[in-house]
Image: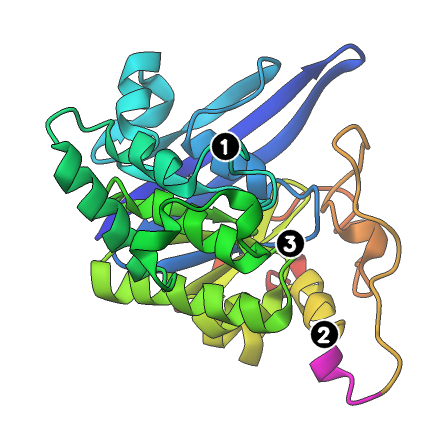
Amino acid sequence: MNLLEIKNYSMSFRCESGIYTTLNNINLNIPQQSMVSLVGESGCGKSMTAMSILKLLPKNAIIDSGEIIFHNQNILELSNSEIRSIRGNKISLIPQDPMTSLNPLYTIGNQLLEVINKDKSISKEDAIKKAIEVLEIVKIPKAKEKLNAYPHEFSGGMKQRAIIAMALATNAELIIADEPTTALDVTIQAQIMNILNEIKENLGTSILLISHELNLVGQYSDEINVMYSGRIVEKAPSKTIFENPLHPYTIALLNALPANNHGKELKTINGQPPNIQEVISGCRFNPRCEKMIDKICNVKSPALKEVEPNHLVECYLYEI
């Protein structure tokens, strides 16, 4: 059963020079107690998808079409007060940068209790108990003592754990983790991902993981959605993406991983990702694609189609 469904969702930005499509016909399902990943290069629309779920879009954003369904409600139609009752309560966000996401003037305990005390019915004693509990879940040692610590006393990995604890403090059903391992070393990245995986397994929380690190998400995700220039171009179970990638962009991403180059010079993807103002006929990836078919790929965008069970790809290679 799906906890959240994004259906045929498109949005644009209104700029001085015109209106530009940012997300194009996004379809994404997040089942209960699952970790679903969105991967792709910077600027492809991953974070905008997350902000759409939270209804935290810039003022110049235009919702062109589609629905975002959570508990049989279309989030896009909710009033500000209605979405506030969901945002931070039923759906929590782990923001990108742990170094700047905590207020340096307040202790970790103050900031955790501010989140917990949104529930007006909770007593002070129970709130403190809850704060200690969530710090212990994210494996912060001496949790009770750490309530009195300030952010500058925490390492980068400890800061990220504290932010995850805040996301847990309201018993959220869905956590959106936006690049949760940014600026952390490899060992700490694995620890953070293990914590998120334990939260999914032990607490039944669903997680939308946004990342550009395919190797990392591949170890933990149930499903991977590969995004390019505002479109989901391939989606499949994690194992399938690594064993049988179909879209040329997915194949190129995997070929660029150091582990797949066996000590040889790293392979790169030709060209640069397009910006939203760039007009490209046909498939948005066709100027960089080694398998581009002239007069087909550069004429009309392909549709996302199921080419094998639970494996969808947006590419003409699998239509002709």
In the displayed structure image, the side of residue 275 where residue 163 appears, left or right: left
In the displayed structure image, the side of residue 177 where residue 202 appears, left or right: left
Q: Is residue 259 magenta?
A: yes
Gap between marks 1 and 2 measured at Cα: 28 Å
Residue matched to label 2? 257
Which residue is most to the top?
16
Where 78 sits versus 296, above or below? above
Where residue 139 sits in the image (x, y, percent)? 36, 64
Q: Secondary structure at mark 2?
A: loop
Q: Is residue 48 visible?
A: yes
Write down the region rendered in magenta. Answer: 258-263
Between circles 3 and 1, the one closer to the viewer is: 1
Residue matched to label 3? 40
The chosen color scheme is: rainbow
Where 247 sits versus 260, above or below? above
Q: Secondary structure at mark 3?
A: loop
